[in-house]
Image (spheres, rainbow, N blue to C red):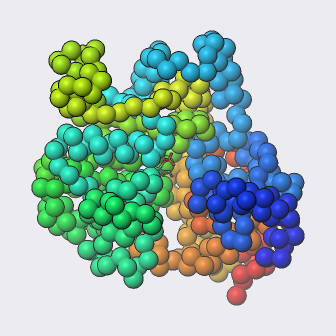
Amino acid sequence: PMMKYSNRTKNSYREMEKAANYLPGGVTANIKHFSPYPVVMESAGGAWIKDVDGNQYIDYLMAYGSLALGHGHDDIKQAMADQLAKDGTVLFGTPHPLEYRFAEKIQAYYPSMERLRYTNSGTEATLLAIRLATAYTGKKRIAKFEGHYHGGYNEVLYSINPPLVAAGEMDDPRPVPESSGLEMFTDQRPVILPFNRWQATERLLRQHADELAAVIIEPVQGGFIPAEKQFIEDLRKLTATLQIALIFDEVKTGFRVAMGGAQELYGVKPDLTTLGKVVGGGFPIGIVGGKEAILNRSRPKGNGDVFDVGQGKSSAAREILFHSGTYNGHPTILAAGLAAIHRLEQDFAHTVLYTETMRKDIEALGRKNGIPLKAVGVGTIFNVVCTETTIRHYRDLQKTDLELRKQIDFHLLNEGIYTKPLNRYSISTAHGERELELTLTAYETVLKRVFKK
Ligand code: PMP
């Protein structure tokens, strides 16, 4: 397959070589790289993406799940054009009405977000959620779950994909840094919790209760490993008792596992929620919201005056939680996000059914060809795991046949099915019957010809 790959992607190779003269590794984010070199894309439309050699792929990466309507959806382009024409500017840098109108729409699906603020990425949203929790509780540490991702900054950059030899006991996981350059921040190491293992989680939370400002969780890990219902309910109860803020990071799960995210699915209300990806319609955004009493920590009030931000001069102003951002609440992006949500209001239920069909069909092909393969997920995201057993957490996932999965991915790439090796599948409203058929045909080819024992 390597030979076929390098023959098909000659221009990608050349482009990556040129890019590497300017960008470390030729990429703008480490995750965009894979071996031997990534495919360089040139154009896209709907469910399809085309590389610089002219190969066409059905896209399941969908910009890491951001493109709920597929590439270049007319609703989004139109909404942005209308907004630009109506406003006569690209950016106000002042309050404008769409900021609260968009908030109203978000709150309709996420009633736990009594107040909210916009950021420019999911990373900033979780960062702000943690700062809010810290200010509110007066405590100084956070807990996160092994295998969960919340962005790329110091407090949360631990134990996302740790080698098991370094990660300690299953029920007493150690924080493993995911990056060099964190030395300055070692005293901010989070407490690491084992996902879907209640007894250990309860023990660790009780043990550290006095220092924990927040527990942050992907309620559906990676968008495809759901928390068990009892686990998430117990976590809600215990964090409330111990006065630890519960943060649902729904950057992946928002408008994916359900329109109202995991909190709708489980019927559980977190104290704070973060959103991103889908809500920006493909443009940079993050949202942090939650209990009014917590969010109001960031309410500008200065010396008791609601409209006096104090400019950081008085001590009262310093008690206000700092949140800023030149581009926060960007009108063009909010217009794009609103268009995406409006379209999903029509098409989401159908896309969920379509995704379920695809999952069942892929699993059936696995069985037919004697390959242990599960398509696990919720709503419009899933992942393909090579195993016969149920996946409940990061360590289960590590025990699956990751090498086989990578091989399947690589062969599928050659057959015109695009996802980054090992990445989850994000389904858009643009994926239709034809794409399903072509995908299954490609799977059949790959599983049958290449892997049948
Ligand atoms: N939290 C979760 C659960 C995510 O999946 C991501 C992005 N993959 C982030 C936070 C960070 O979002 P962003 O890449 O927009 O900073």
Query: Percent position (x, y) of residue 64?
Result: 58, 51
Answer above or below: position of 104 versus 393.
above
In the picture, the quarter occupied by the N terminus is bottom right
Query: As drawn, which residue projects farthest toward the front?
Result: 313
Query: Percent position (x, y) of residue 158?
Result: 38, 64
In this picture, residue 75 sits left or right of residue 290: right
Asked whether 338 or 136 is in front, the reply is 136
In this picture, residue 95 sits left or right of residue 57: left
**Residue at point 24%, 34% (across, down):** 294
Query: Percent position (x, y) of residue 49?
Result: 76, 49
Q: Quadrant of residue 307?
A: top left
**Residue at point 79%, 45% (across, down):** 43
The answer to whether residue 270 shows anywhere in this view is no
**Residue at point 49%, 41% (across, down):** 121
In the picture, the quarter occupied by the C terminus is bottom right
For the image, the number of numbered tags is 0
**Residue at point 51%, 77% (across, down):** 400
Q: Quadrant of residue 290?
A: top left
Answer above or below: position of 311 versus 239.
above
The answer to whether residue 379 shows anywhere in this view is yes
Query: As drawn, which residue projects farthest toward the bottom?
Result: 453
Answer above or below: position of 33 versus 432.
below
In this picture, residue 228 sits left or right of residue 234: right
Asked whether 327 or 408 is in front, the reply is 327
Asked whether 88 or 230 is in front, the reply is 88
Answer above or below: position of 28 versus 35.
above
In this picture, residue 58 sits left or right of residue 223: right
Query: Percent position (x, y) of residue 357?
Result: 62, 55
Asked whether 435 or 181 is in front, the reply is 181
